[in-house]
Image (tube, rainbow, N blue to C red):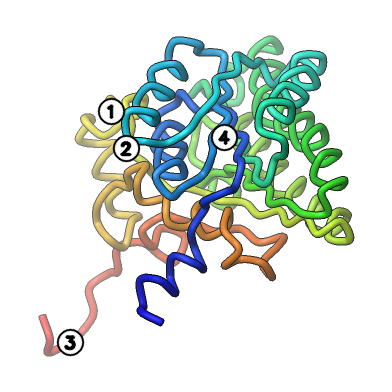
């Protein structure tokens, strides 16, 4: 067997049906597109109807398959309706990617209750509701993989991210609960925690010399991450190659948590 055939059999997503929330976002769009290119049938979910329609068009232009579903993950009735709609169209849900998320950067003392409630509702409640709804389908299938999108802030908090960090730490805890409780149904659950990723929403941060310098000092690779850097791990966790992996957090951060840029040290290899 040739290497290409072996690897395709291990990592291919052909025949897998993936429900993806937050598919119109900067990271979400790149991941959803990449999963489709790996052979998956995509169910694109987002409040941004125009955004997922544009993504659907691109996927289909490239020969892939995708359906669009306008969804607010904070509304239980919408979640139930959307999940049933996806199952009706696709016949099954093999993978769920919980990527829907929001943030508002402001100091702990500046956060108003309405902001707190909104961030909590989308990032944590939305992940809970969608996972619960899809898990009922996966339980009947006796198989499934749930991929939750965490954050750098699950372990190392930046200033101005108090509520967001709390939700992402909660997402990691939900991931562990899912892994423990649903293993008997052959449902796996893992979390991908991106580091400092450059997207349209973070452009202003990376264009600020002081903020960019602060971040780069803390990234061992000395560069920002990009949405496509996260794709490999996402494909791994969606594929059968990760059949014995559950309850884990995968950090895609360029060596940020590991220690960032090293201080000066003696070496003859400079």
- Tag 2 near tag 4, CB within 8 Å: no
Crowding around mark 4 (Cα neighbors within 10 Å: few <14, some 14 to 19, many 20+) is many
- Say which residue label 1 marks: 203
- Say which residue label 3 marks: 267
- Say which residue label 4 marks: 99
**Residue 198 tag number:** 2
Cα distance in 3D space between marks 2 and 4: 16 Å
Question: Could you tell me which secondary element the residue under label 4 belongs to?
Answer: loop
Cα distance in 3D space between marks 3 and 1: 36 Å
Which quarter of the rendered picture does the N terminus lie within? bottom left
Q: Earlier in the sequence, mark 1 or mark 4?
A: 4
Cα distance in 3D space between marks 2 and 1: 6 Å
Q: Which of marks 3 and 1 is in front?
A: 1
Q: Earlier in the sequence, mark 3 or mark 2?
A: 2
Q: Nearer the viewer, residue 44 or 216?
A: 44
Image coordinates for residue 134, horizontal then vertical, percent:
77, 36
- Tag 3 near tag 1, CB within 8 Å: no
Residue found at x 73% / y 30%: 87
Question: Could you tell me which secondary element the residue under label 2 belongs to?
Answer: loop
Q: Which of 125 and 12 is in front in this view?
A: 12
Q: Could you tell whether 132 is left or right of 223 in the image?
A: right
- 135 shown above or below 219: above
- Determine which quarter of the picture holds residue 140: top right
């Amino acid at each position: 067997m040739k290497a290409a055939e072996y690897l395709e059999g291990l990592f291919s997503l052909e025949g897998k049906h993936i429900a993806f929330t937050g598919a119109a976002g900067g990271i979400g769009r790149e991941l959803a597109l990449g999963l489709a290119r790996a052979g998956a049938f995509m169910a694109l979910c987002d409040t941004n109807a125009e955004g997922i329609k544009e993504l659907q068009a691109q996927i289909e232009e490239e020969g892939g398959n995708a359906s669009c579903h306008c969804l607010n993950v904070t509304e239980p009735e919408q979640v139930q309706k959307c999940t049933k709609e996806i199952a009706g169209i696709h016949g099954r849900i093999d993978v769920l990617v919980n990527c829907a998320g929001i943030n508002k950067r402001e100091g702990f003392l500046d956060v108003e209750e309405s902001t707190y409630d909104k961030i909590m509702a989308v990032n944590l409640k939305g992940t809970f509701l969608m996972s619960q709804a899809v898990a009922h389908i996966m339980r009947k299938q006796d198989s499934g993989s749930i991929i939750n999108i965490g954050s750098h802030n699950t372990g190392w908090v930046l200033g101005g991210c108090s509520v967001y960090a709390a939700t992402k730490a909660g997402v990691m805890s939900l991931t562990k609960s899912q892994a423990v409780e649903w293993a008997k149904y052959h449902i796996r659950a893992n979390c991908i925690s991106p580091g400092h990723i450059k997207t349209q929403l973070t452009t202003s941060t990376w264009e600020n010399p002081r903020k960019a310098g602060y971040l780069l000092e803390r990234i061992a690779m000395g560069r920002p991450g990009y949405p496509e850097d996260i794709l490999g791990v996402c494909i791994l966790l969606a594929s059968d190659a990760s059949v014995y992996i559950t309850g884990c957090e995968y950090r895609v951060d360029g060596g940020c948590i590991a220690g960032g840029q090293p201080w000066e040290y003696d070496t003859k290899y400079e």
